[in-house]
């Protein structure tokens, strides 16, 4: 039975390490993710490789009295110290640096406790026969790990919300799956598939992140034209399409420079998200052109919803222009969509209404 268990877990570890090595190779050859997220994913994948190998080694030497107890205990303490750090890598990937700073004191305390436990045995201990056992205060480690996962759950939710909840349910399902895997290991120490589950969740998280990068406009963080086209093709419900265009944007670039033009795009995008995100999906579909497609929730009250959103956007934009007069106005047009067949005409009508608004401003 012991031989079977060892063989089983060795296979699990080999699969986990192979999967993470493949992800490291894939990440190295990819140019989609850059900067600190790239470093974070490297760190996360590498940590899982190291931790998996470390746990395998502790299992191999478990019950071997000729292995120094201190060495065995230090390996276990290293395992318990590094495991919650995987969460730091994920937080790093989504840019939650403040949360990392808040989490670090807890992880440092955990590290100190694990090292002390290697000598005093209150979280775990190694008996004279070289066998590992959980100590009376093993729950301290579970609390640290649990708090780390809960923080990641919370930040993952806010991260998906920032990107208009695209794939948000898949992301939360991923971390729910992770929680189940960790819980199963806590309940039954014989279940040794935790790091394979963590590895799978890391891959899912990486795929989710890549999908976001592909769908998002890098300057404004709105969904991009690629995502917009895909959404148009999938519409099968009554909705409203709202087109927004910044007035005299070329003059902004010519007068204040392209750097300020980018600032304008970001500020207008921020207002769009603030007003429209709860009601629909927000896209940057051109240089200074934006689009919102309302969610199915509002299909029975499209006209009053659009009217309310117009008023709210105008109010916030006018308020912003009081403190920054050079901030341009924005023209808006919309049209209702009945079904897939009416989309082309609706886009033309929304665009024409938007240009009518522009022409009326020039005639003022």
Image (cartoon, grey):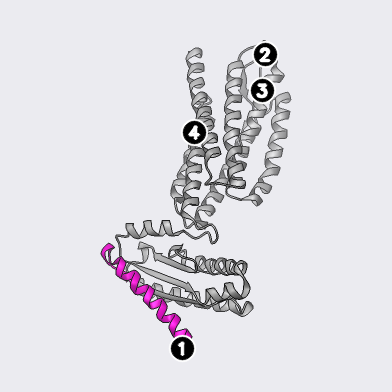
Q: CA distance from mark 2 to mark 1?
A: 88 Å
Q: Earlier in the sequence, mark 2 or mark 1?
A: 2
Q: Earlier in the sequence, mark 2 or mark 3?
A: 2
Residue pointed to by mark 1: 363
Disc 1 to disc 3, C-alpha distance? 82 Å
- The residue tagged with tag 2: helix, strand or loop? loop
Q: Name the residue beneath numbered marker 3.
A: 125
- Distance CA(mark 2)–CA(mark 4): 30 Å
In magenta, the rendered stretch is: 336-364
The mark that comes first in sequence, 1 or 3, is 3
What count of labels does the image hold?
A: 4
Q: Would you name the residue on which mark 4 appears?
A: 197
Q: In the displayed orientation, state which residue is furthest to the top.
A: 66
Label the magenta part by its dominant secondary structure: helix
Q: Position of residue 240 (x, y in %)?
A: 36, 69
Disc 3 to disc 4, how far (Cα)?
Answer: 26 Å
Residue on which the image places disc 2: 67
Determine whether, in the image, residue 358 is placed left or right of residue 342: right
């Amino acid at each position: 039975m012991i031989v079977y268990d060892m063989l089983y877990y060795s296979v699990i570890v080999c699969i986990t390490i192979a999967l993470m090595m493949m992800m490291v190779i894939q990440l190295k050859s990819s140019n989609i993710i850059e900067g600190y997220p790239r470093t974070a994913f490297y760190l996360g994948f590498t940590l899982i490789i190291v931790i998996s190998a470390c746990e395998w080694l502790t299992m191999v030497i478990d019950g071997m009295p000729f292995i120094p107890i201190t060495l065995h205990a230090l390996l276990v303490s290293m395992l318990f110290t590094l495991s919650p750090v995987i969460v730091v890598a994920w937080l790093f990937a989504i840019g939650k640096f403040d949360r990392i700073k808040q989490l670090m004191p807890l992880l440092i305390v955990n590290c100190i406790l694990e090292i002390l436990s290697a000598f005093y045995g209150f979280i775990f201990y190694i008996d004279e026969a070289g066998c590992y056992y959980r100590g009376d205060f093993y729950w301290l480690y579970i609390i640290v790990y649990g708090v780390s996962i809960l923080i990641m759950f919370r930040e993952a939710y806010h991260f998906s919300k920032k990107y208009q909840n695209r794939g948000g349910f898949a992301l939360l399902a991923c971390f729910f799956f992770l929680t189940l895997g960790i819980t199963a290991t806590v309940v039954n120490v014989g279940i040794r598939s935790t790091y394979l589950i963590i590895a799978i969740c890391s891959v899912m998280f990486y795929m989710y992140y890549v999908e976001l990068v592909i769908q998002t406009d890098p300057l404004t963080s709105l969904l991009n034209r690629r995502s917009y086209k895909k959404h148009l093709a999938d519409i099968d419900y009554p909705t409203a399409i709202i087109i927004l265009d910044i007035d005299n944007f070329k003059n902004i670039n010519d007068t204040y420079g392209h750097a300020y033009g980018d600032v304008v795009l970001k500020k207008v995008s921020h207002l769009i998200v603030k007003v429209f995100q709860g009601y629909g999906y927000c896209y940057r579909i051109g240089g200074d052109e934006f689009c919102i497609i309302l969610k199915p929730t509002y299909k029975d009250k499209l006209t009053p919803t659009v009217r309310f959103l117009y008023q709210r956007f105008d109010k916030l934009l006018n308020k912003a222009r009081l403190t920054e007069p050079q901030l341009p106005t924005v023209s808006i047009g919309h049209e209702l969509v009945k079904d897939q067949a009416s989309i082309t005409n609706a886009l033309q009508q929304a665009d024409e209404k938007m240009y009518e608004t522009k022409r009326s401003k020039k005639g003022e």
